[in-house]
Amino acid sequence: MIKENQVGLFFLGLFVAIGLAVSGYFIGQTLYNSKVALNTAEVKGLAERRVTADRVNWTIAYKVSGNNKEQIPRLYEQAEKHKETIKDLLKENGFTEDEIQLGVLSYEFFEYRDENQKLVDEAHRLTGTISVESNKVELVSKVRSNVNKLIAKGLDIENRPPLYHFTKLNEIKPDMLSEATKNARIAANEFAKNANVTVGGIRSARQGNFIVVDAGEQYGDSAKIEKDVRVVTTITFYLND
């Protein structure tokens, strides 16, 4: 009976010892993981570039109008002449046939009635567009003033603002990401210096979105030739004691 009790106590002690050892391992592992997590610094790195738009879209609208339906054939001929006049001017100033797109004429009809709903006037309008898509970004601003001179010749023209685009973002992404990472490490080194530790390797990194805006603006990316490109990376570095 005594021998059986001794055997039971032996196994009980063994299980307790194993339990303590296992729990001790998990406690130690938790402390180790906590220490690793605490010995890090999360910082942000910014990279900025001033770039120039390399693509432009520009639309010129022209209109002709009359006050009765019988005038429509004449209005059509007039609109066709306006189209050719604008197209010739664009070609004379350096744009090629491939860069010029001719839109389709649209027709609008308006009625004007008095308070008794009696028809007092009507208007028939044809509107056409000519678009330019080109990489001759600087040329557009010069030619726009020449297009406006056609107004003095009797053309009803809407010289719409050009839309400037930067399409070479992929070409500058690698250098900007490298710069952002370097700036993040500089920030981490400053933090480590104040904490009397050193910066180790990268534990994790998150890349933010590349943002393109018109130079000096917070919003909008098509009104100016000059653009600002920004990217922010968030990097967690290990810290060494």
Image (cartoon, rainbow, N blue to C red):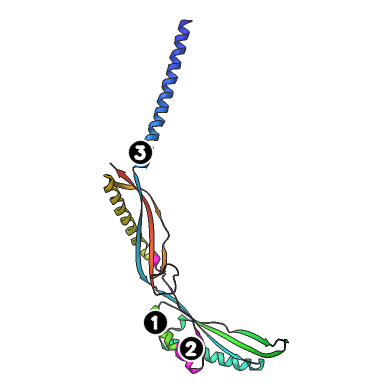
Q: CA distance from mark 3 to mark 1?
A: 61 Å
Residue 229 has which mark? none
* Residue closest to the far front: 115
Q: What residue is rendered at 45% in x and 11% in y?
A: 7
Q: Please name the residue that numbered disc 1 is placed on.
A: 139
Q: Earlier in the sequence, mark 3 or mark 1?
A: 3
Judged from the image, the secondary structure of the residue bearing numbered disc 2 is helix
Q: What residue is rendered at 28% in x and 51% in y?
A: 190
Residue 206 drawn at (x, y percent): 40, 53
Q: Please name the residue that numbered disc 2 is placed on.
A: 86
Q: What residue is rendered at 33% in x and 54% in y?
A: 184
The quarter in which the C terminus is drawn is top left
Q: Residues within 10 Å of mark 2 (few under 14, many from 20)?
A: many
Which of 12 and 187 lies nearest the eye of the viewer? Answer: 187
Q: CA distance from mark 2 to mark 1?
A: 16 Å
Give the magenta-colored segment's residue range: 147-169
- 165 in the magenta segment: yes
Q: Residues within 10 Å of mark 1 (few under 14, many from 20)?
A: some
Identity, as a three-letter code, of the amino acid under mark 3: Lys
Q: Is residue 222 above or below residue 23?
A: below
- The image quadrant of residue 13 is top left
Q: Earlier in the sequence, mark 3 or mark 2?
A: 3
Identity, as a three-letter code, of the amino acid under mark 2: Ile
- The image quadrant of residue 120 is bottom right
Q: Is residue 198 above or below residue 143?
A: above
Q: Please name the residue that numbered disc 3 is placed on.
A: 35
